[in-house]
Image (spheres, helix red, strand yellow):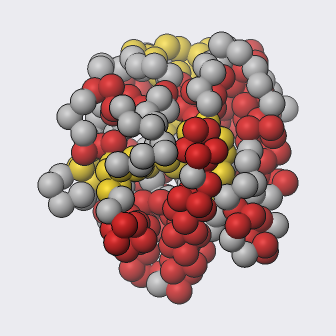
């Protein structure tokens, strides 16, 4: 594999959720930025090499950027991967606890002593399990309860594509609709009383089941309640690339920042772009991420979001998802963002 100094190409990957990186890709910003000098940007999802695809989670690929759920990024760093956070984004999404009508669970207080599904997924890092556990923890905490006050039932998912999607020949997302199958099956079979779902997939599941929504903490007024895999979302880069070519990293970051600025001025188009990213529809995008999701694709490194990242890292370590601890604040690098407009870093 070539060194960062040669830069025959750059790699990027993003999750099938609203990200300014994904928007920048759809807008052609990276092609416009780097094509003139012969730098090619490739998506990990386009590769047929399983090791390259796995870098979406373990970030082992040189010359690569990643934006998406923070659990894999945190996990990779805890495993010793030399990456740096160069930007954060906070796009809220529905975080739902649902049950079937007639279950007797009307409010979160009714979850006491009930069976809650906790997914078990194959793969390097079970981000679905961690996401659900964090949501349950916060839902119960708001009611003066704790995880010990419910029965957490493991539900084992069939092997699937962890990334949730691939891309077709034109670069568009192809989603494999297999999420939450194990939880749904357990709920319908009476093995559990409630399950956790999130985002557009979660809204789809809730509607398909005609489920009772026990609670949705995804838009809770206290941002600390909303901290999870998607809030804040990390933009990471390998340390070698940042050290060798900080100019390239800053230019990449600049186009992501510009994508967020474009989104604020183009709400309808942004909702359509996110629908493509999530293989969904604009009405579901608005239901899952809010009517103003186009205003929440900014990139920054503010104290509140860095503190939130550190808080969530502590949660993951405390519950055994990480093999070692590290200082999340020291993980953040301001080198690239400080080359942009000074006001961005303070947003």
Viewer-proximal residue, 259 or 163?
259
Residue extending farthest bottom: 265
* In this rendering, position of residue 263 left or right of residue 10: right
Residue in the picture at 36% in, 32% down: 1
Viewer-proximal residue, 293 or 196?
293
Residue extending farthest left: 169
Residue in the picture at 73% in, 70% down: 344
Q: Is residue 313 visible?
A: yes
Placement of 151 over or under 162, stated as above or below? above
* In this rendering, position of residue 49 left or right of residue 342: left
Placement of 163 over or under 347, stated as above or below? above
* In this rendering, position of residue 327 left or right of residue 119: right
Residue in the picture at 42% in, 60% down: 22
Q: Is residue 223 visible?
A: no
The answer to which quarter of the image holds residue 141 is top right
Viewer-proximal residue, 171 or 62?
62
Residue in the picture at 36% in, 20% down: 157
Placement of 285 over or under 229, stated as above or below? below
| Numbered-mark total | 0
Residue 329 point in image, percent of width and height: 81, 40
Residue 136 point in image, percent of width and height: 65, 31
Residue 252 point in image, percent of width and height: 52, 62
Quadrant housing the C terminus: bottom right
Residue 85 point in image, percent of width and height: 66, 45
């Amino acid at each position: 594999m070539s060194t960062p100094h040669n830069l025959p190409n750059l790699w990027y990957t993003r999750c099938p959720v609203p990200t300014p990186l994904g928007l920048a890709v759809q807008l052609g910003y990276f092609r416009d930025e780097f094509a003139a000098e012969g730098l090619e940007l490739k998506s990990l999802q386009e590769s047929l090499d399983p090791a390259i695809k796995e870098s979406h989670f373990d970030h082992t690929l040189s010359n690569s950027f990643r934006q998406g759920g923070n659990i894999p990024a945190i996990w990779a760093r805890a495993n010793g991967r030399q990456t740096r956070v160069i930007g954060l984004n906070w796009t809220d999404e529905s975080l739902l606890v649902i049950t079937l009508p007639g279950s007797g669970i009307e409010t979160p207080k009714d979850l006491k002593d009930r069976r809650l599904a906790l997914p078990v997924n194959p793969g390097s890092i079970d981000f679905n399990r961690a996401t659900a556990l964090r949501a349950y923890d916060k839902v119960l905490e708001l009611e003066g309860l704790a995880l010990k006050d419910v029965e957490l039932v493991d539900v084992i998912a069939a092997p699937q594509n962890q990334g949730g999607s691939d891309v077709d020949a034109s670069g568009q997302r192809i989603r494999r609709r297999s999420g939450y199958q194990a939880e749904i099956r357990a709920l319908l079979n009476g093995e559990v009383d409630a399950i956790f779902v999130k985002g557009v997939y979660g809204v789809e599941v809730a509607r398909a089941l005609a489920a009772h929504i026990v609670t949705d903490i995804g838009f809770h007024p206290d941002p600390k309640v909303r901290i999870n895999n998607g809030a804040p979302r990390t933009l990471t880069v390998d340390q070698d690339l940042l050290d060798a070519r900080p100019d390239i990293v800053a230019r990449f970051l600049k186009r992501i920042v510009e994508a967020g600025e474009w989104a604020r001025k183009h709400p309808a188009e942004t909702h359509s772009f996110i629908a493509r990213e999530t293989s969904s529809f604009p009405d579901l995008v608005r239901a899952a991420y809010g009517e103003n999701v186009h205003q929440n694709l900014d990139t920054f490194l503010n104290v509140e979001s860095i503190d939130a990242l550190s808080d969530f890292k502590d949660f993951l370590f405390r519950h055994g998802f990480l093999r070692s601890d590290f200082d999340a604040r020291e993980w953040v690098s301001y080198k690239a963002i400080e080359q942009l407009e000074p006001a961005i870093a303070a947003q």
